[in-house]
Image (tube, rainbow, N blue to C red):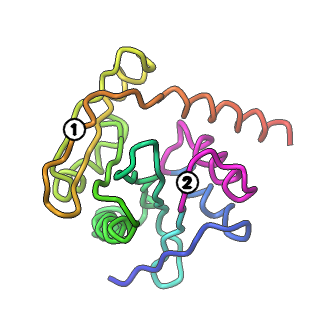
Amino acid sequence: MKLTYEKITRENVDVAIEILKEAFSVVYGSPALELLAYLGGKSEISLQPYLVLFEGKPVGTVGLYELDERDEIWLWYYCVRTEYRGRGFGKRILQDSIEMARTQKGKNVLRVWTYSVWNAAAQAVYRQLMPLCEDYTNPNDDKRLIEEGKPLVYSMSFDGSAILPWSNRFLDLGYEWRQHNVFINLEENN
């Protein structure tokens, strides 16, 4: 299966947002605002977002971003459209993303946070390709999201060395919900 990765631009951002809306219906506003900030040169994170295409048709999104950790890179809103699920696209996208992440200078660890309840379908692929899985229960983060979504952090090392666990460091899950509400208000006022 040959996939192509097209940088998300002003020309294809609407397609990317529709895919994100389908995959992350509850919080699509957060990645949408991140994309718009990125395209406007005002992103707070170092983001590399992609639209994933198969035979010229959009099948998903994925990206890479950095937090404060020097040797880590994170997977950004990795998703596959419903009609393409169960056909190996998710695994191929994750494998390709791992290879993209390996090329990032100074990065040795790839991480992704996800919800075990709301993103249950992706767990098998994460478990296959990313050996370290940790429950995320930081008491300073959004209690409702932790209790209802059961967040996890998956990690892998590019060179096979031991992975320093995330160890429940603060992720700010509530940020996603705050951004979503801002986006919804913007949509309603336009």
Q: Which residue is mark 1?
A: 165
User: Is 71 drawn above or below residue 81 in the view shown?
Assistant: above
Instruction: From the viewer's side, name the closer residue of 18 and 37.
Output: 37
Residue 179 found in image quarter: top right
SS of the residue under disc 2: strand
Quarter of the image containing the C terminus?
A: top right
Quarter of the image containing the N terminus?
A: bottom left
Instruction: From the viewer's side, name the closer residue of 158 and 75.
Output: 158
x then y, percent, for residue 127: 18, 51
Q: Residues within 10 Å of mark 1 (few under 14, many from 20)?
A: some
Q: Amino acid at mark 2?
A: Ser
Q: Which residue is mark 2?
A: 46
x then y, percent, for residue 182: 71, 33
Is 97 placed left or right of 81 in the picture?
Answer: left
Residue 145 found in image quarter: top left
Q: Amino acid at mark 1?
A: Pro
Is 173 placed left or right of 87 in the picture?
Answer: right
Instruction: From the viewer's side, name the closer residue of 36 and 69.
Output: 69
User: Is 182 drawn above or below residue 47 in the view shown?
Assistant: above
Instruction: From the viewer's side, name the closer residue of 96 and 169.
Output: 169
Residue 24 among those drawn in magenta: yes
Q: Identify the residue shown where x is 42% and y is 31%.
A: 171
Farthest right residue in view? 190
Residue 110 among those drawn in magenta: no
Q: Identify the residue shown where x is 23% and y is 62%.
A: 158
Q: Identify the residue shown where x is 55% and y is 54%.
A: 46
Q: CA distance from mark 2 to mark 1?
A: 22 Å
Q: Which residues are magenta?
A: 23-48
